[in-house]
């Protein structure tokens, strides 16, 4: 038997299949575009996303005929939802995390409902990325869509619908909506009533690893499945990734580098305090039922490397095409050996934690005529790493001490990039043998659900660490001094923020 983990991200979807002992036996990936038809908008074509998901599932199904897929689940980006009518037709695009069109709604609703009340119910502080405010935006600005919508579905439950199943979603994904009560594990009726949303317009929230049902035979045949395939509940991509990295106890945290850069510690019980509230650190469900997490993140994250690829890396693209290699590997090979002389404020999108600022913009400080594009590349990656150091510092001052960081995602495969992060954070970072940890976590949940084996037993057998990359003292000392300048950059530039319109 084998198990399929499907990850639906902001820039693409991937399907990975693992055999009964956790070895990868098939993989497929498809990229899709992000649309920005207006300033502050960031959307995905939900029809295209679902079509690409079907493509990657079909591709891995062909590769696993000798070891048929028995069960699958979905790890999905948070917050993004799709309106669907009574016939299952998609009525609009999905608004992703970095979409800020609901910015003006946030303060208005939060003042009426109460920001601290929202935090104590949902575990989150108000920000335009959350589904709650985007739903209000649709109601106000697209009333015809609001009236026609039978259900608002996140990407996990939307794909369930497309696969012929009754839509369900993991507690952790429901938690990213700001409509979900993290204490009772139900959609919160007070919040739904405040925006005029019916609970029947949302899918059924369930613990990760719960069984949704069996994919109907006609759809299973279209996908190339040779046996019955069970669908299990997955959840939000960050907790699923933390699970796949073996983050199972307090003091451990996942360090994910993808479209979003994110550090995810775990807790034995929900954590609410004034300092976490002040700095916008959330509390919501982990992929292990009964445990909780917070997330410290940069929405710019790996997007900054993609921006560099698109705007500067023309030579590297040609080399990658000629050699049949990954363009990001070629780019990262060009990183200078020493730290840059530049300083980057990495807000090329709205910020993540701790500021939750959708207005501030990014900046590159210290440019000279002698500055090379490689030094700019180094500074861009340093800037995101400084932002994560800022987050770690605040978490530690709030009582959340992290002793072990485990790297996952595309960035976790690059030793030079991980070394840079270790130097900036002045903390060792351990790599894992399977860096596509979101899919890995889902596969472990599927195996546990189907075979009845305790999840922690599977984690102990499957998850294997590789290298631990330690800070280089000379560079770590330099970055520690530079960090003191970095933390002054946001308030300084915020005070002179200019209007770009």
Image (spheres, rainbow, N blue to C red):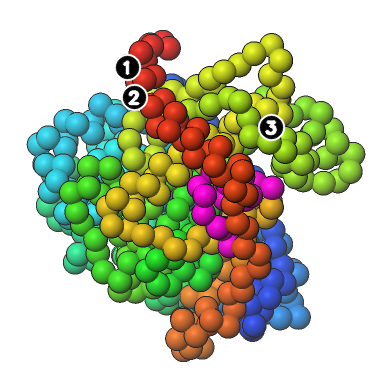
Q: Mark 2 packing: few (<14 Cα in 10 Å), some, or many (20+)?
A: few
Left or right: where does residue 323 sit relative to residue 427?
A: right
In what element is the residue under mark 1?
A: helix
Q: Residues within 10 Å of mark 1 (few under 14, many from 20)?
A: few
- Residue 309 image label: 3
Q: Main secondary structure of the magenta part?
A: helix
Residue 424 magenta-highlighted: yes
Looking at this view, is 407 or 33 the one in front? 407
Q: What span is colored magenta in the figure?
A: 416-430
Instruction: Report the residue marked by disc 1.
Output: 495
The residue located at (54%, 61%) in the rendering is 406
Q: Which mark is residue 491?
A: 2
For the residues labelled 3 and 1, the Cα–Cα distance comes to 31 Å
Q: Is residue 215 left or right of residue 297?
A: right
In this view, the residue in front, 67 or 500, is 500
Residue at 28% from the left image edge and 57% from the top image edge: 399
Residue that appears at 48% across and 75% down: 445
Check if mark 2's residue and mark 1's residue have beta carbons within 8 Å.
Answer: yes
Quadrant in the picture for the N terminus: bottom right
Looking at the picture, does residue 483 appear above or below residue 163? above
Whether residue 9 is visible:
no
Query: Could you say which is closer to the camera, residue 228 or residue 279?
Result: 279
Q: Dot 3: what SS? A: helix
Q: Quadrant of residue 432?
A: bottom right
């Amino acid at each position: 038997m084998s198990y399929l983990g499907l990850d639906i991200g902001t820039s693409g979807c991937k399907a990975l299949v693992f055999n009964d002992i956790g070895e990868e036996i098939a993989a497929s990936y498809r990229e899709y575009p992000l649309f920005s038809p207006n300033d502050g908008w960031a959307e995905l074509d939900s029809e295209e996303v679902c079509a690409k998901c079907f493509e990657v599932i079909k591709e891995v199904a062909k590769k696993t005929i000798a070891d048929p897929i028995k069960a699958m689940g979905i790890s999905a980006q948070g917050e993004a939802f799709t309106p669907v009518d009574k016939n299952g037709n998609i009525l609009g695009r999905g608004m992703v995390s970095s979409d800020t069109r609901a910015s003006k709604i946030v303060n208005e609703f939060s003042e009426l409902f109460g920001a601290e009340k929202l935090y104590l119910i949902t575990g989150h502080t108000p920000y335009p990325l959350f589904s709650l405010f985007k739903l209000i935006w649709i109601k106000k600005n697209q009333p015809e869509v609001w009236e026609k919508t039978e259900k608002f579905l996140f990407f996990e439950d939307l794909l369930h619908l497309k696969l012929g199943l009754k839509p369900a979603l993991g507690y952790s994904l429901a938690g990213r909506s700001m409509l979900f009560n993290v204490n009772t594990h139900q959609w919160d009726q007070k919040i739904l009533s405040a925006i005029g949303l019916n609970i029947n317009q949302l899918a059924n929230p369930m613990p990760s690893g719960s069984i949704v049902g069996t994919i109907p035979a006609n759809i299973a045949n279209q996908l190339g499945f040779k046996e019955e395939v069970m669908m299990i509940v997955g959840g939000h991509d960050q907790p699923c990734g933390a699970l796949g990295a073996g983050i199972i106890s307090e003091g451990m945290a996942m360090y994910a580098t993808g479209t979003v850069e994110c550090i995810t510690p775990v807790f034995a019980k929900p954590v609410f305090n004034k300092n976490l509230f002040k700095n916008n650190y959330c509390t919501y469900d982990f992929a292990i039922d009964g445990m909780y997490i917070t997330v410290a993140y940069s929405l710019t994250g790996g997007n900054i490397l993609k921006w560099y690829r698109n705007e500067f890396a023309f030579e590297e693209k040609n080399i990658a095409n000629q050699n049949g290699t990954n363009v990001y590997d070629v780019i990262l090979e060009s990183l200078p050996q020493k730290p840059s002389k530049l300083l980057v404020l990495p807000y090329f999108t709205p910020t993540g934690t701790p500021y939750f600022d959708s207005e501030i913009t990014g900046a590159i400080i210290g440019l000279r005529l002698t500055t090379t594009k490689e030094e700019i590349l180094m500074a861009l990656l340093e800037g995101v790493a400084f932002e994560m150091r800022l987050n770690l510092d605040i978490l530690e001052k709030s009582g959340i001490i992290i002793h072990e960081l485990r790297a996952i995602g595309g960035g976790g495969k690059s030793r030079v990039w991980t070394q840079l992060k270790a130097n900036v954070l002045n903390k060792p970072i351990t790599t894992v043998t399977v860096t596509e940890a979101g899919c890995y976590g889902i596969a472990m949940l599927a195996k546990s659900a189907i075979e009845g084996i305790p999840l922690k037993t599977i984690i102990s057998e499957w998850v294997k660490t590789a290298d631990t990359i330690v800070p280089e003292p000379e560079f770590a000392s330099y970055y520690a001094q530079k960090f003191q300048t970095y933390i002054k950059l946001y308030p300084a530039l915020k005070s002179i923020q200019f209007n770009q319109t």
